Amino acid sequence: MNAPALMSAPLMHLPPVVDPSATSGVFSLLWLVVALPALGAVVLLLAGKRADAWAHLLGCATVAISFLISLILFFSLLGRGHGDRQVTQHLWTWFSAGHYTVNLDLLYDPLSALFLLLITGVGGIIHVYSIGYMEHDERRRRFFGYLNLFVAAMLVLVLASDYVGLFLGWEGVGLASYLLIGFWQHKPSAAAAAKKAFVINRVGDMGLFLGSALIFVTFGSTSFAAVSASSHQASSGTLTVIGLLLLLGACGKSAQFPLQTWLLDAMEGPTPVSALIHAATMVTAGVYLIVRSNFIFSLSENARTAVIVIGCITLLMGAVIGCAKDDIKKALAGSTMSQIGYMVLAAGLGPAGYAFAIFHLLTHGFFKANMFLGAGSVMHGMDDDVNMRHYGALRKAMPVTFATFAIGYLAILGVPPFAGFWSKDKIIEAAFGQNFVVGLCTLVGAGVTAFYMTRLMLMTFETSKRWEKGMHPHESPKVMTNPLKSLATLSALGGLFLVNGWITTWLTPVVGERVEHSLAVGSIGMSLIALVVVGIGVAVAWQLVGSRPVPRVAPENVSVFTRAARADLYGDAVNDEVVIKPGVAGIRGLGVFDGSVVDGIVQGLAASLTAISVKLRLVQNGFVRSYALAVLAGALIVIFAMLAVNFS
Amino acid sequence: MSFPWLTVMLAVPVVVALALAFAPKSISATTVKQIALGTSLVVLVLGIVMAIRFDNNGGMQFTETHDWIKTFGAHYALGVDGLGLSLVLLTVILTPVVILASWNDGDEGRWGPKGFFAWILALEGLAVGVFAATDVFLFYIFFEATLIPIYFLVGGYGGPNRAKAAVKFLLYNLFGGLVMLAAVIALYVESAKATSGPSYLLSDLSHLHVGTDVGRWMFLGFMVAFVVKAPLFPLHTWLADTCEEATPGTSVLLVSVLDKIGSFGMVRFCLVLFPEASRWATPAVVVLAVISIIYGALMAIGSDNIPRLIAYTSVSHFGFIVLGIFVLNSQGLSGANLYMFNHGLSTAALFLIGGFLISRKGTASISRMGGIEKVAPVLAGLFLVSGLATLSLPGLSPFISEFLVIVGAFVYSPWAAAFAVTGIVLAALYILVMYQRMMTGPGPEEIASSPISDLNLREIVSVVPVIALIVLLGFFPKPLLDMLNPGVQHSLVQVGAHDPTPTVPLSGGSGEGGSK
Amino acid sequence: MSVAPFIVLSAILFTIGCVGVLTRRNAIVVFMCVELMLNASNLALVTFARANGNLDGQIAAFFVMVVAAAEVVVGLAIIMNIFRTRRSASVDDASLLKY
């Protein structure tokens, strides 16, 4: 556990304590935010075919009303004093055993407030988009039911005031993700991807399970309030272990190394699902978990170091994978992995990075949802073909999709003044503030991001037409382009959160005062360096993709690096060789063991009893005189035995 | 003298069962089924009334004590505490469910529907007796008596190899029971030494002082019987064979209700009568339980037969239950007590819905299914929910019990928890792989040619209450936990275990989620 | 009076009966040898009763006689039946009750 400290330990401030007041006034509406989508899900899933006609309307309405309530709550919280921005609503006691009690309480503070807006806002937009995208699917009602279920579970995740409550939402979103990835479950690949996502998430859940147990053993409670109040009294070893266990949970849900392989397969789901769950909200839950547990991570440098390492590895892996994918959704999924790596890394920087992790999470939620929906729009126009090698020159055919996608593109590249510039730049800056190597990773990542996103843009919207025969790309209907426009607006304007350092101040009650590090080159200098790196990435992409014809079939004679990136850097291959193949062999062996040894001993006992009795019964030969002889022998033995006993 | 609730609940199904068995041949099958269902519903109502009248902090209630065989100190003594009542409730809830779900399962059996439903009712009565007995001798009688109905239900109404399965079931359980009989006799010998003469009453025996060695031997005697019943590795092989051949309804009664006698007996008898021996045996039992969790789950992953798979999942879950019992702290024991009830519900749902599917497809082989979701979405949906309950998804009742057990295990030893927690990954694998292979995909060719029908109204009505209860208890398990927790504390006092205090004391005032 | 001659006679008679049971095939002869053994033991019983001066041994001897009489009735009936069905009184032929 003695990882070399990546940073010179600054004098630690104690992390802030979660100490909410009870709800009153408008805050008593808090439960409705969760209850409405939950109710929508129940109604839609139980109502059956008779709800088909209005299912999508109900699905959108519940989320929209939740969004309105979230807005009201947000402004009410904004109106409160700085130290008074944590409220909790007691619903009921979930369970208790001995002196351990878990309450189902909702905790509304600046952090969850932002998430509420993101989930219901972006979620609502994606609901509307889905009306158009899923129009011809006969199971659209069920789709909206699952989406509502997801929104409700995600809200539980961010509103829970207890690790176990968080776990309820955590697994709830996992379930929704499972159902939605496998929504087209007649496709074996979709069913397999859904199962894979759930199972790998469960590996991470082990960490959360054990982490909660250790938290209980250490603090006697798993509520954020209790743990944050006494975390500074725990030993650093304990805090490190808790931190690592929580990190394992975060790795599963946020597709971080080494549990990253499920995310690329998860693209089997309908595109709105990829946008909502596998880009904007659910996959960022790991980041939320780390930031929410700041009272643990702030006190354990080793745990934070681990978080940073994981973040660095994933952000580079994701970017490299994104470079080689021809499937537009998989390229975006690699990018998601990479961007979440940035967030995790920022969260691992501790008080210097928590706020920026959340900031990047929000802006990424905007621009990545924007681009996924854009990709969905492209697929909609191209008969669900996802291969970018069959695209090209779609700018004219789909002007709105192109324009909105371009804004997302500029945002993820970090071009000022779009949202991504502000958030990513801050992370790079903070990373350099801690450690040069980490900073370099983020900078390289930014360059590679620029490369693969430019490649994606060029292959899709520019270059020459490589369409399949008889393909007539067309712009999507209004119900799909309007959501694109609103998300593009958010992607453009997301940087406003940073005006006057608003977001850092806003989050201070949750994550504590930000620790500043001054850089040698200064803030502006850092931004310029980052822009130069991005420019190099774009130029390389133009050189390799834009300036020459794109083959319709992926070339085979490529470098070993490209091959590795196409194979997801062999994540699945490693899993296959290390876990699955030995596992299957082991289980087969165990089956034989169970039958032949465990049951075999018992059966063998029975069989040998039978064998002995077969032999023994031959003594019963039917001759009376041999019986008599046996009686005589027995009598003699008894007599001699008695004599021997009496005369000895 | 108050109303003998438990005797009535015990006697009503048994008497009706006898009446059905000796009813004239002319009585129609439908009438038999209606009588059986009606009786089980009456008992269910009795059970609900009892639960309402139950006082959570009142210790043993609804007690009845009559001398039976004075020279042995045996009594006819009944009574329930929270744990006993919860299992009685599980029995009376599942019996009507099973009767309704197995409406036609008895038609082709050896003794027709009359025998089938008579045995089920007899089993219900005897199961109530076994959970309510507060006299060790009476408990032993009921314990062995419950084998008879199951033997005939498996042997008369199962698959092609049912005779062999029934014999295997009987021999295994009889073996355990006979080892226990030796311990029961030893208990008499010990209690006869006391000045007040021999007594089998639990209330008398719990004060009995037994020597260390004798206590450990008697503990082992009881434990062997209970470990066979609530099957732990390596005594589990009978369960899978029996479930493979039995009808789904029989499997439900066997796994959900009767196997609980094992875990129930550990709490009621092993911990209370032999506290020293229980503490002594804890490390070994915990290791065995953890092995069972992993072993059962791995075997489930490797199974291609639906009932077999579910039986192995139960081996894994009984590992959790026993783990929770023997870590000897409030979280573990509460979790284990709750687990008994929850496992009963989730496994029942899984068996019954799996059974509906098997009877439609005519095969129990998972590899011969596929694409069911497309033709029978309700069936697939309900199956998925019960599968998710089995893999302990939060929001469904088994999660809470599994979480508490793992927390309890962590309090006992982080290593036990670390190994046990792998069970949640394996559970996800066996449930979801099964679901994937059975329900998803395009399915084999024949599904297009002879599509199976979705669940009919009777089948939906029979399993929906179980699913509803699973969801309800997933979010609001408080009534059940309030019923169980006083008994947990009582058992822990009896066994002399204390919850460790947290390493870091809560700083005053701001703890416990602080809502008020 | 010495008991030794009586006991020796009893032992000789018992041995003759014993050997007869083991060696002869004819069921009637076997039967008679069994009677011989019974009477040998009767002789021993009566001898000891006389030597000890109480009646216990004699009572036991009476029991043996009564039981022997009953046995003869049953036994002879069985032998008769076997002879009727199998036209033989050899005990070796009547070996159907085996395994």
Image: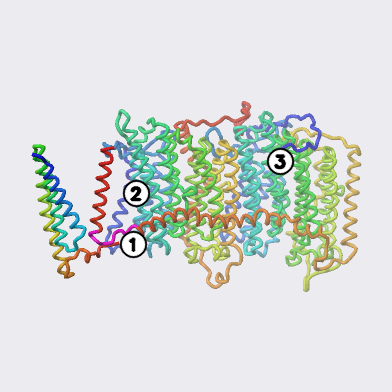
Are the residues tagged 3 and 2 within 8 Å (C-beta)?
Answer: no
Q: Nearer the viewer, mark 1 or mark 3?
A: 1
**How far apart are labels 3 and 2 at the CA level?**
56 Å
Q: Tell me which residue sits at (65%, 45%) in the image.
A: A155
Determine the chain carrying the residue at label 3: A
| Magenta stretch: dominant secondary structure | helix
- Real-space Cα distance between discs 1 and 3? 63 Å
Question: Which quadrant would residue C28 be assigned to in this image?
Answer: bottom left
Which residues make up the magenta segment? A616-625
Position of residue A473 relative to residue A428, above or below, is below
Query: Label 1 vs label 2: CA separation?
Result: 20 Å
Does the image show residue C57?
yes
> How many C-alpha atoms fall within 10 Å of the one at disc 1: few (<14), some, or many (≥20)?
some
Q: Quadrant of residue A430?
A: top right
Q: Which mark is residue A290?
A: 3
Q: Earlier in the sequence, mark 1 or mark 2?
A: 1
